[in-house]
Amino acid sequence: MNHLAVSIAGVDMTSALLWLICWFLTIGLHEGGHAWMAWWRGDDTAYMLGKRSINPVRHIDKGNNMSLFGVVLLPVITVFTMGWPIGFAWVPVNPGKMRHPLRDNAFVALAGPGGNLVGAIAGALVLALAIFLVGTTGGSLALHPFEFHVGQTSTALALLAHLAYRMMLINILLGVINLMPIPGIDGGAVLYYFLNHRGREIFNSLRPYGIIIFVLVVWFLLSKPIGMLFLFFASDFTIWLMNLVGK
């Protein structure tokens, strides 16, 4: 098993770079999904700002420090502290321009995780292709979520497999996290549509505390399930896929 990476402060630089590439691709799919759905439902706000695109650069507001922090700086910090990137981005949405504001806004919210679903499937398919190509040459892959190993194959194929592997993982995790029914999260906008009048009043009162609720729920209630989900796709599912395609 050949290790091909420079390590800085214990972080595999090749792995970190692959994670960041996947992060930016994922941002394009997620935020582009929001913008496309908003445009389709009648809101051209994001379209007029050039954000109806899967190009991640379109979703970095260079004059907005919060955008630069959430899309660029925070993912770089977390990939070196946690091993994989976490950040945030957004597209402006004006439900008032939509044909059916509440319902259409829920569709717009779902389109972001929908983009993650596309990214996860694409990653899994490319990973399966890479596994197949490696298998046809009698080689083997050594996939690891936080390290890059060439394994018994070419460096190009190993890079492709590791990139697709991380693309699958990050899209599954971010898609699941964004579906949580919490104010300020995509799942919250979907839940809001189904609430009655009293439920919406309570939900609106919680909006200022959305980020705090999100952190508390993830940290104290969902950190273990999310970790188990990550490990399942990083290990069990991937081993199953390698055995299936390898045969």
Image: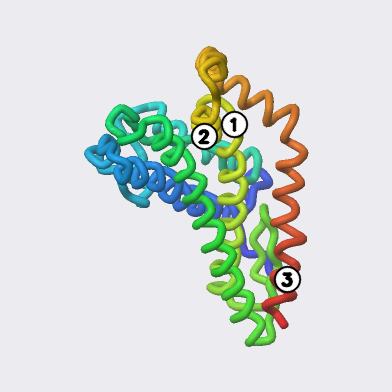
Given the current orientation, which residue lies at the most extreme left position? 48
Name the kind of residue labelled 2 in the image: Val
Q: Position of residue 36 (x, y in %)?
A: 34, 47
Q: Nearer the viewer, mark 3 or mark 1?
A: 1
Q: Position of residue 40 (x, y in %)?
A: 31, 46
Tag 3 and tag 2, C-beta contact below 8 Å: no
Q: Nearer the viewer, mark 3 or mark 2?
A: 2
Tag 1 and tag 2, C-beta contact below 8 Å: yes
Given the current orientation, which residue lies at the most extreme front position? 196
Q: Quadrant of the C terminus?
A: bottom right
Residue to which mark 3 is pinned: 1
Distance (Cα) linking label 1 and label 2 = 7 Å
Q: Earlier in the sequence, mark 3 or mark 1?
A: 3
Q: Nearer the viewer, residue 40 or 121?
A: 40
Q: Earlier in the sequence, mark 1 or mark 2?
A: 1
Residue to which mark 1 is pinned: 181
Question: Would you place residue 121 above or below residue 134 in this image?
Answer: above
